[in-house]
Amino acid sequence: PGSPPAVSGAVVRLDLERNLADWAGGTVRLVPGDGDGAGGVTLSERSRRSDVPYLWTPPYAGGAALEDMVGQCLNLVVAAQRGGLEDRESYSRLKVVTVLGRKYLNVDLFTSHGIRRAADLGLSGSGMADLVVSPLLDEALGLFSPGHRGRLLVVVRHPAERELAMFRYLRAMGRRGVTTRDELPPSASAFASSDFVSENWMTRSLAGKRKGEAVTARDVEAAKEVLRRKALVGLYEDLPGAARRYARYFGWDGGAALGEA
């Protein structure tokens, strides 16, 4: 199976190129499903043994809901945040813990320190995690290697909708006393032009541009090429469909259960 046409002149940053597999590589074709829209490729047995599914979770894009969906419906062992918060005793080894009836590794991949600890414990080569989840793309790349590459999953949502969701969340938290409402702009339109909003957040993340650095047309092309070659993309508007596609791609048993999740 092949990818869409290449983005002309685009260059993928070296750490992404080295530690993330191309989604189309190491796959075999499947007979299309019964109209489930889940896609027609799955990983080969060799790729399943060596590579690690990595769900990158941009903020307010449905990543947490997808993590819950596949963890609950498919009974996967997930390496994310909850297991690390639950078990602080087995610090020197990887261990599967149960949190609210779901299985997690005892790591916290939502902090730089937690990711470094998981890397030191050999997470990617352990074979213990069915799914790795982290919002910290740059740091999470350190979990993988050319011998145990990450297979990138990402759910995308319109950036304006993501920022509006963040505004509503922060405003709701302010009503509960978690944040100071006076710090927030009074309206969604004012919020959109405030420092709360990150300009070109996804492009910066994929192209490796820090806040304050100018984003160029070349950066946009590089980000598009990463998504084209490296990412299995799901849509926020159809999280169950994304989950079914991922289940088929990785050969996770019980994929039909996602239709009822």
Image (spheres, grey):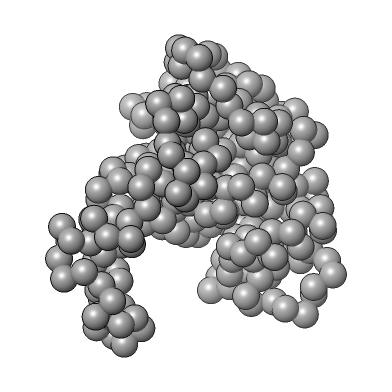
In the image, residue 167 above or below residue 90: above
Residue 52 x, y percent position in the rendering: 67, 41
Q: Nearer the viewer, residue 109 or 235?
A: 109
Quadrant for the C terminus in the image: bottom left
Quadrant for the N terminus in the image: top right
Residue 119 x, y percent position in the rendering: 77, 54
Q: Along the horizontal axis of the image, is 115 left or right of 172?
A: right
Residue at figure coordinates x 69%, y 65% from the top left: 114
Picture quadrant of residue 78: bottom right
Residue at figure coordinates x 57%, y 53% from the top left: 136
Q: Residue furthest bottom?
A: 177
In the image, residue 60 above or below residue 202: below
Q: Residue furthest right?
A: 92
In the image, residue 230 above or below residue 115: above
Camera sees residue 155: no
In the image, residue 113 above or below residue 238: below
Q: Nearer the viewer, residue 41 or 23?
A: 23
